[in-house]
Each structure stands twice: as structure tokens, then as C-alpha cells.
Amino acid sequence: MLTFSLQSGSNGNAIYVEAGDVRLLFDAGISGVEAERRMQRHGRDIRDVCALIISHEHRDHVCCAGVYQRKFRLPIYITPPTLAAISREAGRLGDVRFFFSGQTLEFGPVRVYTIRTPHDACDGVAFVVEHDGRRLGILTDLGHRFDGLAEIVESVDAAYLEFNHDAHLLRTGSYAPRLKARIAGPGGHLSNDDAAALVAACGRNRPAWIAMAHLSGENNTPEHASATVRERVGADYPAFLAGRHDVSAIMKC
Ligand SMILES: [Zn+2]
Ligand SMILES: [Zn+2]
């Protein structure tokens, strides 16, 4: 299995996963033009994607779903409540395939487990993609360290993991108190400490690598996230960045 992030952050998300012949795109939070261009950077044509799978209705994940569907003819996999939440802004969608949160999707030999999260979306999910005995987590917009999350992190070979904010930068930053409370609250996002602690708790069973994902532009920096991993997990641990502004390197799982 191989993967790269087209972009990850509160400014827009899209993650590509390729397993054998199966090509999947998770979320549609950057423009069609940029998505196509960033796929081409790694020699991929976005029109070859067989499923666009939507995690939840927040704009940074769905704002361009309608464009991808109409321009690139991608089938959209989405839960009924999430579709209802985006139907007005998404425009007319021609090829919608429903799943239910918690359901396992199958694309030939590839399985996509959908995992309900306590993030403040109507029916949000995170994902584990499984192929040929390998498991890749796509774990962002998690709310908090909910029951079962540690076991999921321990079970994967590699993962995108949410490092949304540095707790100190969030506390002392410019956001309004209500927004700070939402982000740090049970329906918000994991902090650097939350994410690094999850990896550290895996001990020997930790994923071979993580990609630090969904960083805030206001309340985090790649340096803060990396420093937390170094302190909590170890200086040698491979933690890549799924960045806010460009496509990542290709990572193998
Ligand atoms: Zn998000
Ligand atoms: Zn969200």
C-alpha cells in the first residue's frame, strides 16, 4: 500500500491511498484544480480514483466534493446524515453510494473500516484501510481520545494522526474563548500531547511511522508537533508531516 496527503489541516484535507489496483481518495477539501495538479506531481491521474470517501461534513473535508464528482466523475461514498448536511452547498451529485458509520467498505481485496468518532460532526468517521495484511489509519477530527482509539492506533502499521494544536499556543492564542473551548473540548481535536501520548502508549506495537496531520495554522507549527513526538515517543521515531500547503512525499505502508 502507498499513500500521500494532497493537503492536511484545518484549511483543507484530501488523502490518497493506493492498494494494488484500488485507488481511493479520502475527503475533498481542496480545489479540483489543486487536487488534480498534486496527484500529477506523483504521476497519478485523479480520474483513476475509484471512490471518494467522505469523513464528515465540515468544510475542510467536503467543500469540493461536488466538483470532484462532476469534473472527475468520482463516485462519492458518504453516510446519509453527512450527505443531508452538505446537500445545499455540494450542488447536484450524480453518483452517491451510501454507507453507514461503523460499516466496513470493500473494494476488491481492500477493506476500509469506518470508525465513529465523537468529533462535533453529525455522523463523522475516521478510517483504517487494510490490504494484504497491512493496515493504514486515517485518524483525524477525532474529538478526544475516545474509548477504543488507543487499540486502533496500536493495531495499524502506519497512520495519519491528528496533531491539531499545541495546548499552550491554543490557550494563549488569538481565538475567541468559545472557539478555544470547542477545539480543546470533547468534540474538537487532538492536541500534540494527546497524539504523541497515543503513540507512546503503544510501546513496541507502535506504528512503523506516523504522518502528523490536520495541524492548525494558528495554534500549532510543525516544529511544535515534531518536538512533542521527540519528547514523548523518541528522537528516532519516524514522524512525517502531512502539510497544510502542499502534497507530501509518497509513504509506504
Ligand atoms: Zn477537519
Ligand atoms: Zn472536522
Image (spheres, rainbow, N blue to C red):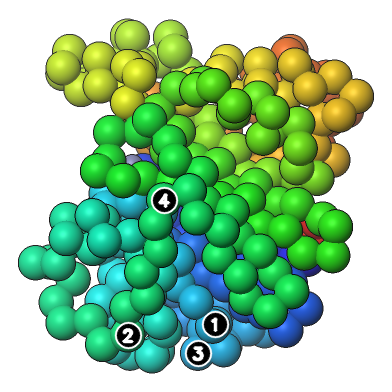
Question: Of circles 4 and 2, which is in front?
Answer: 4
Question: On screen, 174 above or below 36?
Answer: above
Question: CA separation, marks 3 and 2?
Answer: 14 Å
Task: Give how far across and how far down residue 29 sits, in percent.
Answer: 35, 61
Residue kind at label 2, given as amino acid type: Asp
Sooner in the amino-acid sequence: mark 3 or mark 4: 3
Element carrying mark 2: loop
Give the residue drawn at x 44%, y 13%.
167
Q: Mark 4 — residue?
A: 101
Sooner in the amino-acid sequence: mark 4 or mark 2: 2
Q: Is residue 146 left or right of residue 240?
A: left
Circle 3: is it few (<14), some (14-19), or many (20+) Cα within 10 Å? some
Sooner in the amino-acid sequence: mark 1 or mark 2: 1
Q: Quadrant of ligand 2?
A: top left
Give the residue drawn at x 36%, y 45%.
124
The reply to whether dot 3 and dot 2 touch (C-beta < 8 Å) is no
| Circle on res. 3 | none
Q: Mark 2 — residue?
A: 95
The reply to whether dot 3 and dot 1 touch (C-beta < 8 Å) is yes
Question: Of circles 3 and 4, which is in front?
Answer: 4
Residue kind at label 3, given as amino acid type: Arg
Q: Is label 1 within 8 A of ligand 1 (CB to nearest ligand atom)?
A: no
Element carrying mark 4: loop
Question: CA separation, marks 1 and 4?
Answer: 22 Å
Taking depth in this image into account, of 202 and 96 the one nearest to the observer is 96
